[in-house]
Image (tube, rainbow, N blue to C red):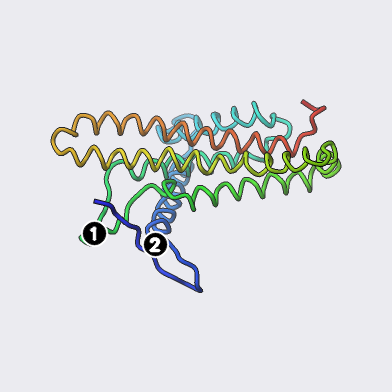
Amino acid sequence: MEHHAPEFTWLGIHFDASALLMIGITTVLVLILAIAGASKASVTNPTKLQNFMEWTIEFVEGIIGSTIGSKHGRGFIALGLSLIMYIFIGNMLGLPFSIVTEDHVSWWKSPTADIAVTGALTVIVIVLSHYLGITRNTKHYFAHYFEYKGAMLILHLIEVVSKPLTLAFRLYGNIYAGEIMISVIIGAGWFGIAPLFVWQGFSVFVGAIQAFVFTMLTMVYISQTLIHEEEH
């Protein structure tokens, strides 16, 4: 049975209520995890959550170091940490269960299974990367576009826009397809119990990989506008 999202209209704009709900829940969960990991931080007797948060920070530092570099990337640790935690937790929310009302309205899903959410994240990446290029690397940022002439410039501009857009479609496609598969397996009844556990385990792996890829490519796009080619 096909489910549909609850929608409402405000100022002539249609909103998906379930997507807004899941965005809020994901945000709260990330905030709680970050506060809990830092509230009782100890050098001599760290908690398991503190160890996990420190490992996550080191992991993000490794991503930034391999893309932007430690010299330019120090200020992007908070961005990378926020992205990887938000996307991973968002990817996981639709795995354990779903909430569907009698009129087939779906209220619980991964927020990243909505193209509007992944698209918004991508817009943030595009705007931020070009803003940083314009404000911090002005001369080389604009000079880069004068290297192309005529049709090549048009193709290059299409490439500049299309590359980040793949972030949105890749993340959305993987998470949405995973939740569709879960619905199909659940529809098999008792025969789907074993495959369901296997698929959910695989979905955790896919969700983690997609969070890593999105964060990694974000830092790559920032590095391409922020760092002049001769500095690599």
According to the picture, the residue beneath numbered tag 1 turns out to be 101
Label 1 crowd (10 A; few <14 / some 14-19 / many >=20): few
Q: Nearer the viewer, residue 185 or 61?
A: 185
22 in relation to 6, above or below: above
Residue 4 lies left or right of residue 219; in this view the side is left
Q: Residue at x 68, y 43 (%)?
A: 158
Q: Nearer the viewer, residue 166 or 71?
A: 166
Type of the residue with mark 2 = Ala
Q: Residue at x 55, y 48 (%)?
A: 121
> Residue 30 appears at what percent x and percent y?
45, 46
Type of the residue with mark 1 = Thr
According to the picture, the residue beneath numbered tag 2 turns out to be 17
Q: Residue at x 69, y 30 (%)?
A: 70
Q: Does the CB distance between marks 2 and 1 fall below 8 Å?
A: no
SS at circle 2 = helix
> Residue 41 appears at what percent x and percent y?
48, 38
> Residue 122 appears at what percent x and percent y?
57, 46
Residue 223 lies left or right of residue 110; in this view the side is right
* Spatial separation of the CA atoms under disc 2 and disc 1: 14 Å
Screen quadrant of the C terminus: top right
156 in relation to 62, above or below: below
- Return the residue found at the far bottom: 11
Label 2 crowd (10 A; few <14 / some 14-19 / many >=20): some
